Image (tube, grey):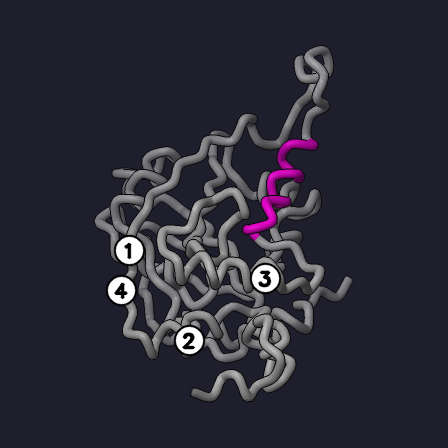
C-alpha cells in the first residue's frame, strides 16, 4: 500500500521555514505537566515518539530537557522533515512516516490508533498537545479579543470539507472504542482508557502586526489559497479588499 499526504497538506505546508518562524512554541510549564501525566517526567533516557513532529516545535523542547530523552520524531511532509533535521538535535531521530503504519497528519482513525497502541511498551501512554489560537478554536470557546472574534467568524465561514481540531471530531475515534450502554462498557477492551484526561492553559504569544498575517498564512487551508480565491475564503469580495 502506497501512503501519501493529501494534496492540501503537501501544498499547504510546503513553506516549512515560514511555518517554523510564525508558529508559536509551547509554554514550558505545559510541557512539564504533560510529561508528568505521561509518567516520563524525571525519567532519564525515556523513549518518546513525537508523531506528526512538523518542524520540531515540540520536539526541540523534549530534546532540551535534562532527562536526555531519546526522541523518535515522525513526520511525513518532506519539507517539514528537512527543517526539523536541519536543527541538528543530537538525541532525536527524524523519520519519514504516517500514523497508521509509522513507517497522516490525521491521527484520528481506527488504523492510526491501533498502530500507536502497537508500538507502545506495556504501561506506555499516549499524549496529545495543541496550540490553539482563539480564532481557530471550537465554536464554543470564547475569544479573548474582538479582532480574534472577527477572525474566528471568518475561519468558521470557510469550509473545505476537512476535519480539524476546531471541529472536535477527533474525539470520535476514542469514544467509539466502547459502546455507550453501561452493560457493554464493562465487557469492552478499549485500546486507550476513557474518559480522556484533558487540561488547558491560556497564554499570550506577542506578535508584531506584520507577523500576524504570516501566522495566519501558515494554516494549511489558508496557505493554499491565492488572489481572489484567498479573498473569497476570507469572506471578501475580491483580492482588491486586501489593498488599503
Q: Nearer the viewer, mark 2 or mark 3?
A: 2
Is label 1 in contact with label 4 (beta carbons under 8 Å)?
yes
The residue that mark 2 highlights is 213
The residue that mark 3 highlights is 97
Q: CA distance from mark 4 to mark 3?
A: 33 Å
State which quarter of the image contains the C terminus: bottom left
Q: Is residue 173 magenta?
A: yes
The front one of 128 and 85 is: 128
Q: CA distance from mark 2 to mark 3?
A: 30 Å
Name which residue lies at 29% across and 51% down: 203
The residue that mark 4 highlights is 206
Q: Nearer the viewer, mark 3 or mark 1?
A: 1
Is label 4 in contact with label 2 (beta carbons under 8 Å)?
no
Name which residue lies at 66% across and 38% down: 172
The front one of 190 and 158 is: 158
Q: Position of residue 222 (x, y in %)?
A: 56, 72
Q: Can the viewer see residue 206 in this picture?
A: yes
Q: Nearer the viewer, mark 4 or mark 3?
A: 4
Q: CA distance from mark 1 to mark 4?
A: 6 Å
Is label 2 in contact with label 3 (beta carbons under 8 Å)?
no
| Chain part drawn in magenta | 165-176
Amino acid at each position: 500500500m502506497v501512503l501519501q499526504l493529501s494534496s492540501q497538506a503537501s501544498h499547504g505546508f510546503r513553506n516549512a521555514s515560514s511555518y517554523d518562524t510564525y508558529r508559536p512554541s509551547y509554554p514550558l510549564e505545559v510541557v512539564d505537566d504533560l510529561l508528568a501525566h505521561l509518567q516520563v517526567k524525571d525519567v532519564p533516557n525515556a523513549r518518546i515518539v513525537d508523531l506528526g513532529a512538523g518542524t520540531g516545535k515540540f520536539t526541540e523542547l523534549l530534546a532540551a530537557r535534562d532527562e536526555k530523552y531519546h526522541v523518535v520524531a515522525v513526520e511525513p511532509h518532506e519539507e517539514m522533515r528537512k527543517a526539523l533535521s536541519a536543527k541538528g538535535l543530537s538525541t532525536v531521530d527524524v523519520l519519514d512516516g504516517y500514523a497508521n503504519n509509522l513507517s497522516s497528519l490525521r491521527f484520528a482513525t481506527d488504523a492510526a490508533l491501533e498502530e500507536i497502541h502497537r508500538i507502545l511498551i506495556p504501561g506506555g501512554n499516549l499524549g496529545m498537545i495543541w496550540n490553539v489560537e482563539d480564532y481557530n478554536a471550537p465554536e464554543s470557546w470564547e475569544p479573548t479579543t474582538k479582532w480574534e472574534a472577527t477572525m474566528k467568524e471568518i475561519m468558521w465561514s470557510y469550509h473545505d470539507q476537512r476535519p480539524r481540531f476546531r471541529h472536535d471530531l477527533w474525539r470520535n475515534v476514542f469514544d467509539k472504542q466502547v459502546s455507550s450502554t453501561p452493560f457493554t462498557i464493562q465487557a469492552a477492551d478499549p485500546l486507550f482508557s476513557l474518559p480522556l484526561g484533558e487540561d488547558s492553559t491560556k497564554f499570550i504569544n506577542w506578535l508584531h502586526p506584520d507577523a500576524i498575517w504570516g501566522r495566519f498564512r501558515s494554516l494549511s487551508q489558508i496557505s493554499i489559497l491565492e488572489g481572489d480565491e484567498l479573498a473569497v475564503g476570507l469572506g471578501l469580495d475580491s483580492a482588491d479588499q486586501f489593498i488599503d
